[in-house]
Amino acid sequence: MTTDLDKLGSDWLSRIDAAADLAALEAERVAALGKQGAITGLLKTLGGMSPEERQTAGPRIHALRESVTDAIAAKKAAFEAAELERKLATETLDMTLPVLSAPQGSVHPVSQVMDELAEIFADLGFAVATGPEIEDDWHNFTALNIPESHPARAMHDTFYFPGESEGKRMLLRTHTSPVQIRTMTSQEPPIRIIAPGRTYRSDSDATHTPMFHQVEGLVIDRGIHMGHLKWTLETFLKAFFERDDIVLRLRPSYFPFTEPSAEVDVGYSVEKGRRVIGGSEGWMEVLGSGMVHPKVIAACGLDPDEWQGFAFGCGIDRLAMLKYGMDDLRAFFDGDLRWLRHYGFASLDVPTLSGGVGA
Ligand code: 2U9
């Protein structure tokens, strides 16, 4: 029995070794381990054995099945690795080649909106600032007057990295505000920036994706007040939605990093059964804003008695949906060309203030 099983084992291992491709390997697997397979058949004989026989034969047959299973898995992994190597070697893509025919894709609506924002705010004297998406606790929370106990810090909202890096707890930024903190700690005021970019929150449903895009704006100077904030947002929204009948309503609100804080509603009207920005048939919440909290100014090493500022934030995905009449956030991540074409995006769209930012 022992020698028979040894012989059987080495026969199967050499058959597996000789399999020329994945299909041949699969045929060997079925022949050995399938429902009607040889080793499966051997396992079935255990039922008819005496307890003594089974005690010696059982472990040997199981060991045989295990070694054959392992050999098949290893051979399969080797075939797959070789296939990947072959693909990597043959399927090269030269990214520097010119396009052969008319380009198929287009600038993504989110990128398009980011370009439009940069264009509009550049005209108002704002620079575009960027920063790391992997941040530390201090830049993302502490400097923004978000205390340890604040719900935004809870594990269910923030993606934390395990362990620490140079004594710091690292995370995926939950907003682009750390970019403004980095600007305030590295540049002298006056500061006028917008910070567009990717942000991350552990949140996923029909209207939330774990990665989303935000734009925030920050102005730091002497004598800044809410009037500057309202004018800036009104001017921005008029340019962005390409309408003059933009009406704003500032509602008192609370954010830890601004005081006072205001939620900004924009008037909408109904055209062809659709809500469009402009007019005043109803109100839609579009932005959050406020005067930068003195504690935030002080945390960045500036004297809040000398320097004041305003800040605002909003979701870029939402801005794109409102401007282009898109109703499903999930389509943003599908990469479906038909969707881009449906909304009229062309390959070489470039926003300009003279040609229209949405042209
Ligand atoms: C600094 C000081 C203040 C940024 C601000 C908001 C209000 C706001 C949300 C809108 C929708 C984010 O995408 S959203 O979830 N943001 O309402 N953000 S004020 O305030 C700052 C930022 C940086 C140094």
Image (cartoon, helix red, strand yellow):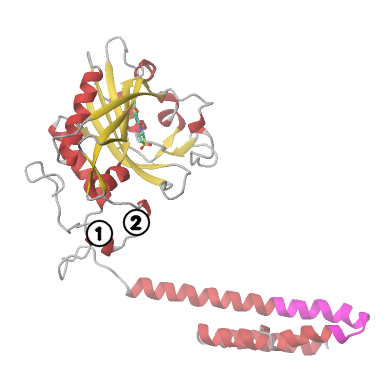
Could you tell me residue 115's position as x and y percent? 20, 44
Task: For the N terminus, give its image quadrant.
Answer: bottom right
| Residue type of the residue flagged with mark 2 | Ala
Specify whether residue 65 is painted magenta.
yes
Rendered-image quarter of ligand 1: top left
Q: Name the residue tied to disc 2.
A: 331
Q: Main secondary structure of the magenta part?
A: helix
Q: Is residue 188 at all visible to an observer of this figure?
A: no
Look at 63% across and 78% down and name the residue there.
71
Look at 31% across and 45% down and name the residue there.
317
Could you tell me residue 87's position as x and y percent? 38, 74
Q: Nearer the viewer, residue 359 or 174?
A: 359
Q: Name the residue tied to disc 1.
A: 340
| Residue type of the residue flagged with mark 1 | Leu
Q: Quadrant of residue 280?
A: top left
Q: Which residues are magenta?
A: 47-66
